[in-house]
Amino acid sequence: MSIAVLRSIKPPLRNFLVNSIVFCMASTLSLFICDGALSLFNFPPVLPQRISHPKNFEEIRNNIEFHYVFKTNDHGLRYRNIPTEPAGSSHRIFVSGDSFVEGEGIDEGKRFTDLLEDEFSTSSESVLFINGGLASTGPLEYGRLFQHVGLKYNPEGLLICLFVNDVADTPAELAQNGLIESYRFRSGIKKHAYSFWPHIYTLLQEVKFRREYRNKTRTSDFISAIVRQAEKQNISPARISAWRASLPQDLVKAVNRGEFNGAILSLGLLYPRFWSDSIDLSSDLAMKKWQNMTLLLSKILERAEQSAVETGVVLLPAPFMYDPKKHSEKNPWIIAGTEIHERWLWEDTELQKRLRIWTKEKNVPYLDLTALFRKTIQSNKNPDWELDGHWNNLGHQVAAKAIASWLVDQHVYSFIKNNSVANR
């Protein structure tokens, strides 16, 4: 705007425009100065990737069905501290997966990884099953954990334990370079803001992340936090009202106390196809996530092969695939509106079929535990927590026994011989 044009404008409006221009220029300059100051204090221009749990962390975790001590080592794993370099006659297998591997609700020493370690180790030779479980994640996150933490332990083997919901937990968008690396997409105003003030943009993202994480994990008002998310997703007020009315108030109170998994109640509103997308792969979004998941898994296999790490894959079934009680109208997943199908109890699901084909193409040993857990239920044994759905002690025992036999019978790892179990 030229000086002549400014002079032709009436004084009140002219003063407002001048003040606005000065304010914008001063604000822009201040942002550049602040961004430079953050850079001088070594504040990162991008959010650091969260690879593992906090290091050397300990807390007692209470749930309405269980309580246990959660403790991490100096690499942020729920595993004891050991030297990164193997010593003596020992072998190491890094076990990747989500909360079922981590051992949600189970004390250390009773998880299937601990039981496998006891099964194959003797006083003269040890086979360590290093627990690389990372709750509430998928192959992107625990693949990254294997690459940046697991390989530090110099393992000879990698055991990838896929849980059924890994499909839904895989992002629909991935970076084109290094699939296990950072994936951040910016467009429009966000893209330009980051290009000018990367440190300030990152600081604001960090504040946003902490607030959202706190709302999801430590909220004392679960319903309000989920309603806000639903409104951002443009979910109709009628659906939100119906969801609120359906919720068991005792479980809502438990979520607010931090004693129940809020996702069991919230996904019926925010992502009702969570399980059907994972098991049936019946939507365009599900197929995109499946393709991305297999890309990520292929990347993990490639990284393992580069480090001469032998690999095996195990599918851990969801309770909806083997336990009829989980299809009761009293199940909180169903009450809250999540899509569940009874045919999963007996059919060979689309996910199972595709995983068999994919692992065969990749020439990687594969074990599907679904049939075994169906037999366990048929023998009137309960391998999981009734409401939470994670395995209880019996579930970990069943899994450990099956995996141990498979490792030996199928020669999954060359350093575990056919007579290993018999000798022990």
Image (cartoon, rainbow, N blue to C red):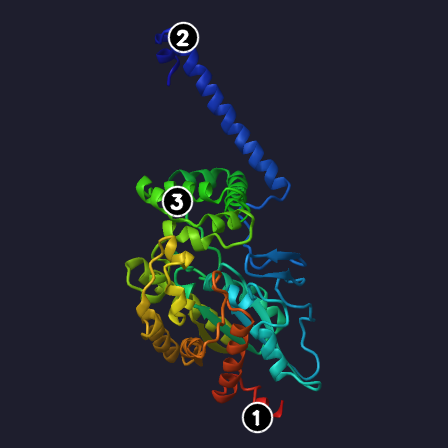
Q: Residues within 10 Å of mark 2 (few under 14, many from 20)?
A: few
Which comes before the other along the chain, label 3 or label 2? Answer: 2
Q: Which residue is mark 2?
A: 12
- What amino acid is labelled 3 in the image? Arg
Could you tell me which quadrant the N terminus lies in? top left
Residue located 51% across and 73% down the image: 395
User: Three-letter amino acid code at disc 1?
Assistant: Asn
Q: Could one spot residue 309 in this view of the protein? A: no
Q: CA distance from mark 2 to mark 1?
A: 93 Å
The residue labelled by disc 1 is 419
Looking at the rendered structure, the secondary structure element under dot 3 is helix
The residue under label 3 is 244
List x then y, in percent, for residue 38.
60, 39
Q: Is residue 176 left or right of residue 287?
A: right
The reply to whether residue 319 is in sight is yes
Name above or below for residue 137 compared with residue 194. Answer: below
